[in-house]
Image (tube, helix red, strand yellow):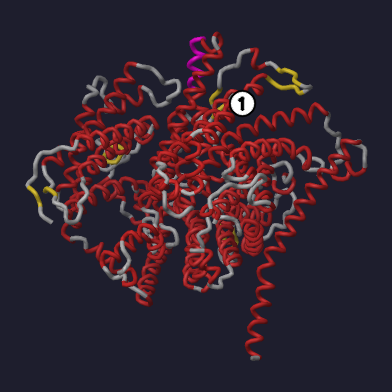
Amino acid sequence: MTTLPSTLILDWKRIFKWGSICAAALLFVSLVGMPIKLDPKSIISPLLSLGYVSLFWLPLIFGYVASSRVVLEGVETSKPGLSDLLTGVLTGAIGGAGLTLLMLGIENFDIRDPLINWSPQLLEVLAFGARDLNSAVWIGIGGALGLVGAALNVIPESLRRGVSYGFFTVLAVAIFEPALDDMSEGFRLEWLVELIFQKRGGLKLWPAIILASLIGLISVVSKGKVKKAVAQYRKQEGSQKKQTSVVLFGIVAALGVVLPIFMGTYVNSLLANVGIFLLLALGLNIVVGLAGILDLGYVAFFAVGAYTTAVLTSEISPFFAPGLTWVLSLVFVVLLAALTGLIIGAPVIRMRGDYLAIVTLGFGEIIRLLFLSDFLKPYFGGAQGILGIPGIDLGFVYISGTDTRGIFYLVLFFCGLAVYVSWRLQASRLGRSWMAIREDEQVAEAMGINTVNSKLMAFVVGAVLASFAGAIMAARVGSVFPNSFMILISIVILVVVIVGGMGSIPGVFVGAFVLIGILGGPKQPGLLQEFGSLKLLVYGMLLVYMMLQRPEGLVPSARRTQELHQEEFLQDSWLKGTDDEDEEQPIEGEEAQI
Amino acid sequence: MKEEKTVTAVIEGKSKRRTPLVDRFLFVVKVFLIGLVTIGFLAFVAQQISPDNWFARWRNPGATGLSADQIKGLVISGLSQGVFYGLIALGYSMVYGVLGFINFAHGEVFMVSAYTGYIAANKFSANGMWESNFALCLLIVLLLAVMVSTVTAVLTERIAYRPLRNSPRLIPLITSIGVSFVLQNAVLGIFGPGTQGYPQLPEWLAKQRSILTFEISGIKILVFLVTIVSMTGLWYLVERTKTGKAMRAVAEDKEIASLMGINVNRIIVTTFAVGGAMAGVAGVMFGLLFRAVNPMTGFLPGIKAFTAAVVGGIGNLGGAMSGGLALGSAESIAPQLILEPLGVPGVTQLKDAVAFTVLVMVLLFKPSGLFGERLSAEDRA
């Protein structure tokens, strides 16, 4: 590849395209209310709050995107240089101009009637709290951020990595502030927290700078050794990989057992929430990830688990109150969940994949409506639900619903069980037949797999895992209500599985911790409780983004990646000439296949 | 020789034993459902003949029977609900016919239109035009809402679905769930979470009228008229114009259609636009009829409209409308007709459950829908 001397040629069409998309995105973010809602959460106090981060990252990203160019093999390109930087500046400035217009608009027109965020409050945030700030300042800010974005493209890769790691570390530390605050008491590290955090929240300026530069330096010095290690881990095969995986999971499990002792109520209850969703996601991972059945009514099994526990253990359940212990009721929970899995699974199992999705969604809604209705009110209490569910008596220890640490250990145990089950199933005959069905059902059937039974088994295993989560949830909250089992939950769990990586157990862990831990579940607040109802918007965007850009998820399973990028793999092997069978085939043949 | 025999025997034995287990269960389910519906219906007939009848009293001791007016009212409200399902179902059906995936976000397009209508109507109402010049206002509101919903539908196609044209079928479905989430919560964020009200209708439209002994409000007549007009327009577009011919060709086979010189991308955009416009009409009418709209308005009607599309046979436009009407009536009548005679209390709460049960039953008994589906061979797989 030869490089031309850099000349100052600007692609105006490209600049305007990305600039106006950037402006539209900024307007959308502002009008949805992100800057206002996220302003209370400060990152670097008092300089930067999350509200401003939600505005600043857009010109930066668009500057980066607009100035990055497609490098084609064999085509002459100029060195990245001034024209790229200028592209970034102009893109960012056009984006920022959108906010300038918005400020002028808010000052002069009042259309607050339909648009609730068209308010003086937004104006105040946009004007950085100053009363008479020239709104044109946003053009400058946008340009500067665009410049930074473009500069990231121009500087060498190691430096880019250092800068971004430094920035993300600061962001992460600020996000984890409540958790660190809570943990510091257990570790007797209050002084450290006081050193780096402001009393009212947010990092102090100097610690932030030191932290960022430290992490940046480390990553520049280490020169991507971490990445190499991960790549090497992924390349391992057979027993070696198994060994490493077992060791890794061992470390995670050990941390899970030891850490809660040092943590306060806040982190423990947060982890218990994450754990319940993790358990659900592990179950759905078997159904969606391994067997490829898109079950949108997964919440039904969660509800069955919770209601079975409630009826069997509560002394005041309306119709039938045997008052069993939690452990004993678990037996019935498993049986009933498996039965529900069979009953829901049997009619839908032969349907087309997309019909199945809608019908399971219907079943999920039917179950909630039935629990809610007057029809079953004598048995399940209708909208009032079932109250008075006792804690969990394990014989040697009693865990009440408010004992967050105990609940966390219980969740941890069941998550471990779920991981073990999914891990063992993955390589088993059943697991392999699931994967075969996922890839091509007709071929799988032709290979002698009983597709109906295999798919039903996936339904049943998923149902049982979800019912465990339901049983724990019931004991934790002490009551169950039909409206805790909205379809929303199914979809949030689906997002967790997809963002993490369908069919990948580590992926599900990452998905649950990142999404439920930081953003929070449908009703449970996460670390960033400021998000409130906006988190669902973020979930939706993440889902679309992942499907478009990275359908295999953050931590993909190798097999699934191959399936989803079959064409690219074919092309790669064709380019490399490793695919001997296709050597004689002309390119037209390949295209026709696609 | 002997061994071979046992092997085949084992295989045969297994295949005889294994698969039918599910089928047998399904048979029981089918018999149970049919039995339930039949007994409920017979009990209803019995209670209509005389509420004191033992069969009517058997499950439902408080049986009173329904008067003719009550039944007519149920039919009318069912049909006027069904019209919306039908109009939205058209969009599902057309997109499924052309692209072969369920556009889950289509219900949200309907909601966006209802919101646009609410904003425009309230602006008109604020300066008094809504009362003084209702017909003109309604026309403008309708055009505006249809425009916005069309643009929304086309934008979602451009941003979210076009890059996924050749991916496995479930991928665009999952994407559309995400799009639906985004639209719902964006509207919630921008316009606030509360339920918003449409302005009051003029007197002559809100009044009850009596047509062929059916008591029906003026607005419902308007809804039916608008639906008939838009259905006629759609029929003309699909069956009589060149674009419609191209749409049918693309639905039949995309590759061959493009070989015949049809711009497949443009036709797909047109399909989304037409579907969006139909949902737009439905959105404004929904707002006028129920006079309330919130960000979740689109979710249930959306799913039920898909049900309607399946009931009528997916890809079949006349089927989608009839499916919508059938589903709307079933949902309105079945609770009183079948569930109440069976002694189920609070039947109106189970309206939505009935709609989903209809979906399950149609897919169990006649998966291709009541009027037959029209899909290309590859989509049917």
- The quadrant where residue B285 appears: top right
Please name the residue that numbered disc 1 is placed on. Answer: B290
Q: For the C terminus of chain A, which image quadrant?
A: bottom left
In the image, is residue A24 above or below residue A382? above
Depicted A229 relative to depicted B44: above or below: below
Front residue of this view, candidates A505 and A263: A505
Q: Is residue B6 left or right of residue A155?
A: right
A47 or A488: nearer the viewer? A488
**Image point (60%, 66%), residue name:** A395
- Left or right: residue B35 versus residue A54 is right
Image location (x, y in percent) of residue B49: 90, 36
Give the number of callouts.
Answer: 1
In the depicted structure, whether residue A21 falls above or below residue A486:
above
Mark 1, secondary structure of its residue: helix
Tell me if I can see residue B189 in this picture.
yes
| Residue projecting furthest to the left | A5
User: Is B154 included in the stretch rendered in magenta?
Assistant: no
Residue A334 x %, y %: 62, 63
A237 sits left or right of B281 in the view:
left
**Span shown in magenta:** B119-128
